Image: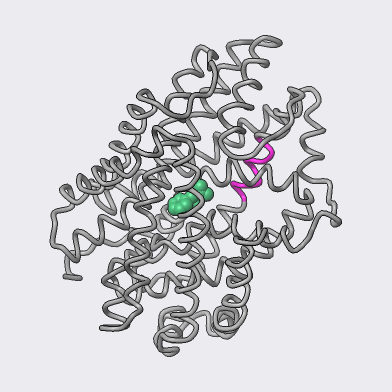
């Protein structure tokens, strides 16, 4: 079966694909707000620390499972721990992304709707649920599944290789405009004024949760994408590239969004409210006070970026299920994409008509299931999987990364399980 598997073409392709999954709504609507609320530059520091000390080793753990087995999430666990209870990790890794994509694509749909509204700067009230939203959700989901249907190289790799550089260019352009708006300095202060008194235990819990979500950990994505990474590739280097790209994008997004929000004299919010309520105000205000044409151009570029960022993430969610159906069930790729489309569409019906359902599905999958997934990955790689196999995979048979291996193994075996357990518990008590 491994014979007809595709591989990503280069390290750049691997990083673009992984970064494509990582860069998404989390960077745009949660990160900038969290920075401001939890200590500005001090929070950014905590976030960077969490990303490198925990998310990075956890990312590598998932990557090891994927590349070692060259298999989808369920197939991988069957190979590494046949007949054991660890298959739960495989199943969870396929189920979680299916649930996430069902509501993530609704947000993708809102973004398409707002992209069209940007041309006239006429946004109206934010209406998150209903038939129009079902229509745009269907379009977004169909486009995402369509890209995946083209395959790993011609679909996923190609789309990310164009989208990720484009996203960086767009966000930098928007940022340049934003930081030059009158009164933008208050927004810049909001992001960079370090306030160490705001750093508490909660801050760490939020920073880590955000980092896990942002790096798309604990849901079979890094595992599945890594199964397409060539055996000669340096996993540690491509992982580091991914972490850096995702971090950088988060910070750029912060400087693209918050100065504009403050310049308009609006209090920033987090979540859907920031992108679909606050920012439309900012854009219409810009249109009224300066040039409507320029305001429309910035709005169009911004919502286009949101659509693309959401799509590079949704295709990674879809690929997890598709890889499973193709490899374990022997279903043709195009048919597998259609099945995933239908399942995600049906699963999303509740969320598309009820914000309450949307909130519950989001919280359950991206807090609870994600944390359980991360915990299982860490325990499996730290305590169950053969250490020699792990070393082999990260050092390419002892030829590279020999020094970092010890640090990695220590973090995954001892530090990560304790910290993830604390995060898990804090989800219930905070
Ligand atoms: N990492 C994406 C973001 O920050 C979200 C995501 C989560 C994507 C899970 C895929 C899977 O928006």
Instruction: Tell me, yes or no, whether the highlighted magenta stretch contains residue 126.
Output: no
Instruction: Tell me, yes or no, whether the highlighted magenta stretch contains residue 254.
Output: yes
Q: Is residue 315 left or right of residue 274?
A: left
Q: Residue at x 55, y 34 (%)?
A: 170
Q: Position of residue 69 (x, y in %)?
A: 30, 75
Total label count? 0
* Quadrant of the frame with the N terminus: bottom left
Q: Is residue 158 visible?
A: yes
Q: Is residue 329 above or below residue 395?
A: above
Residue nearest the viewer, comparing 292 with 190:
190
Q: Quadrant of residue 94?
A: bottom left
Q: Position of residue 355 (x, y in %)?
A: 48, 36
Looking at the rendering, the stretch of residues picked out in magenta corresponds to 248-256
* Quadrant of the frame with the C terminus: bottom right
Q: Position of residue 159 (x, y in %)?
A: 36, 43
Way the structure is coloured: one colour
Q: Is residue 271 above or below residue 227?
A: above
Q: Position of residue 85 (x, y in %)?
A: 33, 80
Q: Residue at x 35, y 78 (%)?
A: 86
Q: Is residue 3 above or below residue 411?
A: above
Q: Residue at x 62, y 50 (%)?
A: 248
Q: How would you classify the magenta stretch by its main secondary structure? A: helix
Q: Is residue 54 left or right of residue 352?
A: right
Q: Is residue 421 above or below residue 105?
A: below
Residue nearest the viewer, comparing 84 with 186:
84
């Amino acid at each position: 079966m491994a014979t007809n598997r595709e591989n990503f073409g280069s390290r750049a392709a691997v990083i673009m694909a992984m970064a494509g999954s990582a860069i998404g709504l989390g960077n745009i609507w949660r990160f900038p707000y969290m920075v401001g609320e939890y200590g500005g530059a001090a929070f950014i520091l905590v976030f960077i620390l969490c990303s490198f000390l925990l998310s990075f080793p956890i990312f590598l753990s998932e990557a090891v499972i994927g590349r070692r087995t060259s298999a989808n999430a369920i197939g991988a666990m069957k190979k590494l721990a046949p007949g054991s209870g660890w298959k739960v990790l495989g199943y969870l890794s396929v189920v979680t992304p299916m649930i996430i994509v069902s509501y993530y694509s609704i947000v993708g749909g809102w973004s398409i709707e707002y992209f069209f509204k940007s041309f006239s700067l006429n946004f109206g009230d934010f209406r998150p649920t209903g038939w129009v939203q079902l229509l745009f959700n269907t379009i977004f989901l169909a486009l995402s599944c369509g890209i995946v249907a083209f395959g790993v190289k011609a679909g996923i790799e190609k789309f990310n290789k164009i989208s990720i550089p484009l996203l960086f260019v767009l966000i930098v352009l928007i940022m340049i405009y934003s930081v030059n708006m009158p009164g933008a300095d208050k927004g810049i202060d909001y992001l960079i004024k370090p306030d160490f008194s705001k750093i508490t235990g909660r801050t760490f819990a939020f920073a880590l949760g955000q980092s896990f979500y942002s790096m798309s950990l604990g849901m079979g994505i890094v595992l599945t994408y890594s199964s397409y990474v060539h055996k000669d590739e340096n996993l540690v280097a491509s992982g580091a590239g991914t972490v850096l790209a995702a971090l950088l994008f988060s910070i750029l997004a912060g400087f693209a969004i918050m100065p504009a929000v403050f310049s308009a004299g609006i209090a920033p919010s987090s979540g859907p409210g920031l992108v679909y309520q606050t920012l439309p105000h900012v854009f219409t205000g810009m249109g009224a006070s300066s040039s409507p044409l320029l305001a429309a151009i910035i709005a169009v570029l911004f919502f286009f970026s949101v659509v693309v960022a959401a799509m590079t993430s949704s295709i990674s969610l879809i690929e997890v299920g598709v890889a499973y159906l193709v490899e374990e069930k022997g279903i043709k790729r195009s048919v597998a994409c259609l099945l995933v489309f239908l399942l995600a569409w049906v699963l999303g019906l509740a969320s598309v008509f009820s914000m309450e359902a949307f909130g519950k599905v989001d919280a359950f999958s991206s807090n609870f299931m994600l944390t359980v997934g991360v915990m299982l990955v860490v325990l499996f790689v730290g305590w169950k999987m053969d250490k020699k196999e792990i070393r082999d995979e990260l050092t390419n048979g002892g030829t590279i990364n020999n020094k970092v291996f010890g640090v990695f193994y220590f973090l995954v075996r001892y530090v990560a399980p304790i910290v993830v357990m604390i995060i898990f518990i804090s989800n219930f008590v905070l």
